[in-house]
């Protein structure tokens, strides 16, 4: 395959990963806000199916971030293989690349925290453990934490995609 075809395939994978990561937090935030508008009390009993969706989404985001990192690094590797050198990029593009890398690392760390701490806690509570006031307080705390982290992930997705625009047009 020629250089441009390989780059195009890699760009497609990179773009699909960006869509998955960017749309995931946005969709779940819309879900939370819609439930709130429908007057579903945030302290209402947990739903196993809803928690399963959130659990799967966090796992998918982690996979999407990994795809982003691998396909992003592949741009340089493809250039190195086909052209014998890394691409020369402008200082603005270097700064944008740094923002994208740091944003992806932060997003992965947040997603990992959600997967390791928040998801298991909410699953445990939705399975019937922790009834009573203490369980309701913990569920409320975990749900609020989840919502806050979803907003942060959405913000990071916007920052990363903005960095992509600066990287693309300042090479």
Image (cartoon, rainbow, N blue to C red):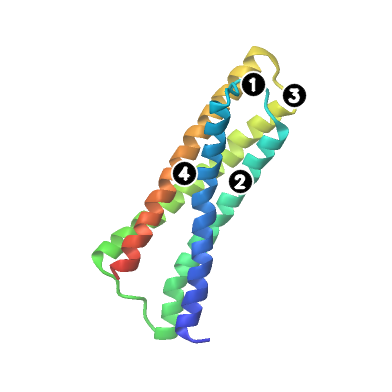
Which label's residue is closer to the chain start, 3 or 1? 1
Task: Provide the residue designation for mark 2.
Answer: 57
Is 126 situated above or below 15?
Answer: above
Q: CA distance from mark 1 to mark 4?
A: 25 Å
Task: Provide the residue designation for mark 1.
Answer: 44
* Position of the C terminus by quadrant: bottom left
Which label's residue is closer to the chain start, 1 or 2? 1
Can see residue 102? no
Q: CA distance from mark 2 to mark 3?
A: 22 Å
Which of the 4 quarters of the picture holds residue 47? Answer: top right
Is 140 situated above or below 105?
Answer: above
Rendered residue at 50%/79% (across/down): 6
Task: Provide the residue designation for mark 4.
Answer: 153
Q: Position of residue 22 (x, y in %)?
A: 49, 51
Q: Position of residue 43 (x, y in %)?
A: 60, 20
Q: Residues within 10 Å of mark 4 (few under 14, many from 20)?
A: many
Q: Position of residue 159 (x, y in %)?
A: 37, 50
Q: Position of residue 12 (x, y in %)?
A: 51, 69
Residue in the foreground of this view, choosing between 77 and 92: 92
Q: Nearer the viewer, mark 3 or mark 1?
A: 1
* Residue at the extreme bottom: 2
Q: Residues within 10 Å of mark 2 (few under 14, many from 20)?
A: some
- Of the numbered discs in the image, which one, if any, rests on residue 128? 3
Mark 4–mark 3 contact, CB under 8 Å?
Answer: no
Can see residue 132? yes
Q: Give the left or right position of residue 161, taking residue 28 as reference.
A: left
Rendered residue at 64%/30% (across/down): 121
């Amino acid at each position: 395959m020629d250089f441009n075809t390989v780059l195009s395939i890699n760009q497609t994978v990179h773009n699909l990963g960006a869509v998955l990561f960017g749309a995931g937090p946005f969709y779940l935030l819309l879900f939370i806000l819609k439930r709130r508008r429908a007057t579903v009390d945030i302290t209402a009993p947990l739903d196993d199916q809803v928690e399963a969706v959130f659990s799967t989404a966090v796992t998918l985001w982690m996979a999407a971030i990994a795809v982003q990192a691998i396909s992003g690094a592949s741009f340089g590797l493809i250039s190195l293989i086909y052209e014998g050198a890394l691409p020369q990029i402008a200082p603005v593009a270097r700064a944008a690349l740094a923002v994208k890398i740091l944003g992806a690392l932060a997003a992965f760390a947040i997603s990992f925290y959600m997967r390791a701490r928040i998801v298991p806690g909410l699953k445990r509570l939705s399975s019937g453990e922790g009834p009573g006031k203490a369980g309701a307080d913990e569920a409320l705390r975990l749900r609020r934490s989840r919502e806050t982290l979803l907003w942060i992930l959405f913000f990071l997705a916007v920052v990363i995609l903005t960095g992509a625009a600066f990287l693309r047009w300042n090479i």
